[in-house]
């Protein structure tokens, strides 16, 4: 009995301790303070002036092309250039055998001298007959014949002079010169070859590659869209007669020189729905060669009311629509559907869904929920790297084409474009 009583007391003591511990835990749970609002990083969007640029594919073409052809018949005696080298305007390229043309010139000169001598005689005779006919010493017919002979002599002298000039020209054609300055290609003939003027034998081709043309293609639909945006005032012309173009090679290298827009063709290709845009590049280092595939970034307009949102603050919903979470005036989270057009570095240009002064969550988006109260703080983001926009974005370039409204509408222009080309719809 004594042992059972001891066990009973121990059980009661343990139970009492457990009850006290549970009570203490309950008191601690009730005393814990509620959690505070989630802290998120936000950026306040404000209208900015950004350049709208586009990237167009194209190929390089020579600024000028001169096909050097034979203009007289003869044997090529000498070639005076190195294939693939730069030549100057007027530089001697070939020497064709001049001997036959020197002989022809001498013959023409002799014929001219004979005509001049005959003219001197006939002129003197006509002068004498003029005096004699006044005294009725010779007949009127004889005087008229003397005057006619003098006129014939003058015509013979003029023909002789023309023949001499023709012979001089042909002799000059035996020395073949470059009509333009540029880079010469391979020689089409060698020494000893017989060339003909009637066949216009090709001797060589000279191409001017500094400066250089770049022929680009643009979509007519994108052109019309840019025109509408300029007319509506959502975009502004960047300035007349100063459109700048940056050139990107096929391997991604950006050329240090910038070109300018020359013109936009007035005809649209019926098969592709595109038109041609021509730009001019200085190509001072002559790194660009005719026929190369390139991409040109053309800055064609400016958007003075652009709202820029970092990419980490923009997500897609299940339908693929871009969305962003915005902190309202009461610090509650709102979900907004956005309309984006292009990118500027790591930011989207938003044209609908946001208002100036809105606070967009860019840090802690995974912790924030629509309707939740949050504690917004300024996000710590790196400084932007560029302020130019690529107009081939979601709503500005759905057909994948590009535009040239700056030149086609108002001769608009701006600085070289460096915008990204990714899209969001």
Image (spheres, rainbow, N blue to C red):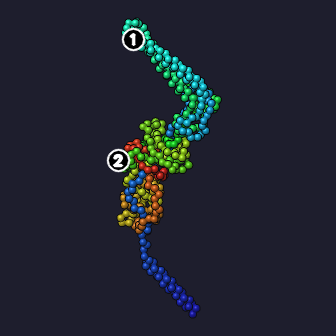
**Residue at screen point 42% across, 51% down:** 51
Q: Is residue 25 above or below residue 372?
A: below
Say which residue label 2 marks: 232
Q: Is residue 43 above or below residue 128?
A: below
Q: Which disc number belongs to residue 86?
A: none
Q: Is residue 152 visible to us here? A: no
**Residue at screen point 38% across, 57% down:** 47
Secondary structure under badge 2? helix
> Where the N terminus falls, by quadrant?
bottom right
Q: Is residue 81 visible to us here? A: yes
Q: x and y percent of residue 190 in the render?
A: 63, 32
**Residue at screen point 45% across, 65% down:** 380
Q: Is residue 85 above or below residue 129?
A: below
Q: x and y percent of residue 138 in the render?
A: 41, 7
Cα separation, mark 2 vs mark 1, equals 90 Å
Say which residue label 1 marks: 131
Q: x and y percent of residue 26 in the render?
A: 46, 79
Q: Going from the N terminus, do you reach mark 2 or mark 1 first?
A: 1
Q: How many marks?
A: 2
| Mark 2 residue crowding within 10 angstroms, few (<14) / some (14–19) / many (20+) | few
| Mark 1 residue crowding within 10 angstroms, few (<14) / some (14–19) / many (20+) | few
| In-image side of 328 versus 298 (left or right) | left
Secondary structure under badge 1? helix
């Amino acid at each position: 009995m004594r042992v059972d009583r001891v066990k009973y007391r121990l059980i009661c003591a343990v139970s009492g301790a457990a009850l006290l511990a549970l009570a203490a835990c309950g008191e601690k749970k009730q005393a814990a303070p509620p959690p505070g609002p989630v802290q998120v990083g936000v950026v306040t969007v404000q209208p900015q002036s950004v350049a709208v640029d586009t990237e167009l594919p194209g190929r390089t073409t020579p600024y000028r092309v001169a096909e050097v052809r034979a203009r007289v018949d003869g044997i090529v005696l000498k070639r005076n250039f190195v294939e693939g080298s730069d030549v100057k305007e007027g530089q001697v390229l070939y020497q064709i055998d001049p001997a036959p043309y020197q002989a022809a010139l001498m013959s023409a000169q002799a014929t001219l001298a004979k005509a001049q001598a005959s003219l001197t005689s006939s002129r003197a005779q006509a002068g004498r007959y003029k005096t004699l006919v006044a005294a009725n010493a010779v007949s009127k017919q004889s005087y008229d014949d003397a005057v006619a002979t003098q006129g014939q002599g003058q015509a013979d002298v003029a023909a002789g002079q023309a023949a001499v000039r023709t012979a001089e020209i042909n002799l000059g054609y035996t020395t073949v010169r470059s009509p333009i300055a540029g880079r010469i290609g391979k020689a089409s003939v060698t020494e000893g070859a017989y060339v003909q003027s009637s066949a216009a034998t090709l001797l060589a081709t000279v191409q001017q590659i500094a400066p250089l043309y770049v022929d680009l293609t643009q979509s007519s639909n994108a052109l019309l869209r840019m025109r509408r945006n300029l007319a509506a005032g959502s975009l502004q012309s960047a300035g007349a007669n100063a459109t700048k173009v940056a050139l990107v090679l096929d391997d991604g290298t950006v050329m240090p020189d910038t070109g300018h827009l020359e013109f936009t063709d007035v005809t649209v290709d019926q098969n592709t729905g595109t038109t041609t845009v021509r730009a001019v590049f200085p190509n001072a280092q002559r790194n660009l060669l005719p026929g190369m595939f390139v991409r040109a970034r053309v800055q064609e307009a400016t958007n003075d009311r652009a709202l820029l949102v970092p990419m980490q603050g923009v997500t897609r919903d299940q339908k693929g629509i871009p969305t962003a979470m915005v902190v309202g005036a009461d610090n509650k989270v709102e979900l907004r559907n956005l309309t984006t057009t292009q990118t500027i570095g790591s930011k989207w240009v938003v044209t609908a869904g946001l208002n100036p002064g809105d606070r967009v969550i860019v840090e802690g988006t995974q912790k924030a929920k629509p309707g939740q109260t949050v504690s917004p703080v300024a996000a710590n983001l790196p400084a932007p790297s560029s302020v130019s926009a690529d107009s081939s974005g979601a709503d500005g370039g759905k057909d994948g084409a590009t535009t040239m409204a700056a030149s086609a509408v108002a001769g608009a222009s701006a600085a070289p474009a460096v915008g990204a080309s990714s899209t969001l719809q």
